[in-house]
């Protein structure tokens, strides 16, 4: 379970809430007084999905899926779909503040301009959102600022003429084995169609957790070279890929994964009640 929590949430299983992180396990225990019994019996009959593709995926028991050009095709297609219907997409306009206007509308301040909206859907960390709220929403800001997040470095490595000694989707790592590595995904095994030309073996190494927090706290410079070195050492030790990669991409995603710690559901409920009390849209 510790490795799973690190791989999915980049967090510590001793600090995370099972109720918020894996609600199906919590519901199984609450309903049947046993996690195993609840999982065996299942949730009961569920309605058939309306999508033929979803029904096909369920019938064929897909364990994973991707898009031919990579998952970036999804936001690209969404933008194309929306703009073709008259929706305006703004880029390079950082939000500086939010305020509530008359008739329960939001005013979104964009520095030198602003716009009004019926609804605001935020995809930024809760702690960052808390700093954008108006003074009258201070209780809500405090509730949101209590939701922490962790950073993860993702390193994509490609090797020419190499072969993996194992097959599968990838593996997760307990902190006792390697505190820096959360897990390694075998991209070429899962989706060989995306190996490119000439084809090369692709793996993705995820780094983070307490190791990254310790580095940040000590004032260490978090460089691309550091992450690449750590990733190459991991695949050399764990997968036997000792040669230098032909290509490498490194991305540090700051505060990208929220931590559903104990009592997280209470924080969400508090935020909902505060929104309702203030009449926020």
Image (cartoon, helix red, strand yellow):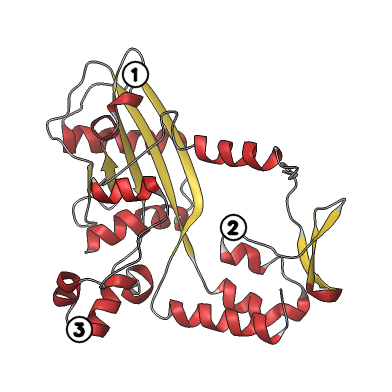
* Label 2 vs 1, first from the N-terminus: 2
Q: Is residue 210 above or below residue 64?
A: below
* Label 1 vs 3, first from the N-terminus: 3
Give the structural element (helix, strand or loop) at label 1: loop
- The residue at which mark 1 appears reads as 246
Circle 1 crowding by C-alpha within 10 Å: few under 14, some 14–19, many from 20: few
Mark 3–mark 2 distance (CA, rounded to whole Å): 37 Å
x 35%, y 25%: residue: 194
Asked whether residue 210 appears in the rendered view, the answer is no
* The C terminus - image quarter: bottom right
Instruction: Please tell me whether mark 1 or mark 3 is closer to you in this view.
Output: 3
Q: Is residue 223 above or below residue 111?
A: above
Label at residue 230: none
Q: Which of 20/206 is in front? A: 20
Instruction: Please tell me whether mark 2 or mark 1 is closer to you in this view.
Output: 2
- The residue at which mark 3 appears reads as 32
Asked whether residue 13 appears in the rendered view, the answer is yes
**How many numbered marks have been drawn onto this rendered protein structure?**
3
Q: Which of 157/178 is in front? A: 157
Circle 2 crowding by C-alpha within 10 Å: few under 14, some 14–19, many from 20: few
Q: Residue furthest left?
A: 165
Give the structural element (helix, strand or loop) at label 3: helix
Q: Which of 226/64 is in front? A: 64
- The residue at which mark 2 appears reads as 124
């Amino acid at each position: 379970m510790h490795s799973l929590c690190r791989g999915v949430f980049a967090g510590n299983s001793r600090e995370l809430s099972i109720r918020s992180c894996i609600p199906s396990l919590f519901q199984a225990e609450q309903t049947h007084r046993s996690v195993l019994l609840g999982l065996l019996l299942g949730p009961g009959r569920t309605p058939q999905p309306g999508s033929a593709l979803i029904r096909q995926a369920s019938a064929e028991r897909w364990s994973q899926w991707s898009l031919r050009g990579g998952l970036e095709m999804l936001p690209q297609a969404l933008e194309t779909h929306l703009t073709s219907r008259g929706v305006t997409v703004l880029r390079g306009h950082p939000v500086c503040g939010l305020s509530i206007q008359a008739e329960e509308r939001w005013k979104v301040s964009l520095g030198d301009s602003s716009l009004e909206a019926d609804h605001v859907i935020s995809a930024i960390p809760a702690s960052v959102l808390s700093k954008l709220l108006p003074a009258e929403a201070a209780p809500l800001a405090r509730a949101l600022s209590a939701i922490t997040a962790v950073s993860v470095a993702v390193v994509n490595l490609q090797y020419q003429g190499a072969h993996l000694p194992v097959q599968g989707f990838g593996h997760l790592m307990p902190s006792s084995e390697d505190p820096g590595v959360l897990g390694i995904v075998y991209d070429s095994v899962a989706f060989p169609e995306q190996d490119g030309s000439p084809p090369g073996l692709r793996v993705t190494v995820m780094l983070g957790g307490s190791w990254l927090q310790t580095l940040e706290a000590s004032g260490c410079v978090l460089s691309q070279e550091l992450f690449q070195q750590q990733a190459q050492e991991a695949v050399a030790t764990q997968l036997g890929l000792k040669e230098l990669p032909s290509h490498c991409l490194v991305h540090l995603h700051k505060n990208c994964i929220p931590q559903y710690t104990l009592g997280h559901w209470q924080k969400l409920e508090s935020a909902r009640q505060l929104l309702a009390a203030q009449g926020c849209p």
